[in-house]
Image (tube, rainbow, N blue to C red):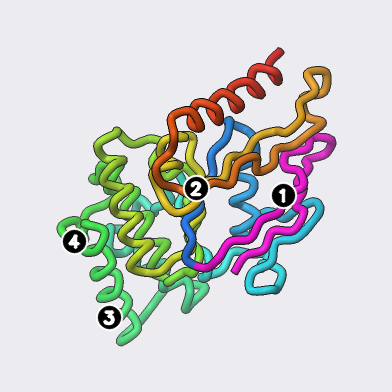
Amino acid sequence: MIEIRNVWKRFDDNVILENISATVKEGEFVTLVGASGCGKSTFLRMLLGTDSPSQGSILLDGKAIPSEPDSGRGVVFQQYSVFPHLTVLENVVIARAFERSKLGFLWGAAKKAAREEAAELLNIVGLSHMLHRYPDELSGGMRQRLAIAQALILKPRILLLDEPFGALDPGIRADMHELVLNLWRKHKLTVFMVTHDLKEGFHLGTRLWVFDKLRVDPQAPNAYGAGITYDLPVGACEPELLEEIDGSLSANKQAEEI
């Protein structure tokens, strides 16, 4: 489904990502981990279409991935991307409305159908009892459920999650893990999820990518970018491997700070 060919990303003289190549089949759930600032979110933005490679290419179904976001790629950020002046139901309906009209309005049968569709989706994510509340009346976990419903109403093939649970308490995060896994299976999504938590990355999905630098020059810390240093099937992880990955990430971070 997705083919990444020798992708590099530079900002002026700073190399963020270097020489990344990989293929992802439809229906895979890929978690991305790595040190802060190593380019995970930059890579996600290239999949979304809000950023582009400096070199190399990303193909979707054999064609260059669209350079602008579209309904085939949904995204959920750590910061809740909801409209504070709209109710929970209206926040989900408006995603469908903007798809149909640049003004964001629906009328008649189209409006009724969108509201029914949104209400059904909100029931799936556990917000059926909050349809007419406003975002500031919701907990952090509820707002994240709302953001996921917003992304899913357009029925994307690809769901991009950028540290969506980083601000949540551990108990709520566990509930969100279960929700996302259920939605992934139900809707047969292809998922890419950035996380700062190595254990979370091993727990979710089917595949773990570790982003890290293969080479570090303490005299020129921005001369080299990160690549995929581990590409592992998700499941039972040997403690020794977890320690090895964690140690390599910490070592490179310390080398950059010297």
- Disc 3 target residue: 112
Q: Which residue is mark 1?
A: 20
- 215 over 81 or under it: above or below: above
Quadrant (top left, top right, bottom left, bottom right) of the C terminus: top right
Residue bearing the label numbered 4: 128
CB contact under 8 Å: marks 4 and 1: no
Is residue 208 shown to the viewer in this render? yes
**Is residue 150 found inside the magenta-colored segment of the image?**
no
* Image spot of residue 218 (x, y percent): 78, 18
* C-alpha distance separating marks 3 and 4: 17 Å
Q: Residues within 10 Å of mark 2 (few under 14, many from 20)?
A: many
Measure the alpha-carbon separation of dots 3 and 1: 45 Å
Does label 3 or label 4 sit earlier along the sequence? 3
Q: Which mark is residue 12?
A: none
Position above or below: 16 against 133: above
Q: Label 1, label 2: how many angstroms apart (C-alpha)?
A: 16 Å
**Which amino acid lies under the numbered mark 4 shown in the image of this protein?**
Ser
* CB-based contact (under 8 Å), mark 2 and mark 3: no
Q: Which residue is mark 2?
A: 31
Name of the residue lying farthest toward the top: 258
- Residue sitting at 64 percent across and 22 percent down? 253
- Which badge, 2 or 3, comes first in the chain's sequence? 2
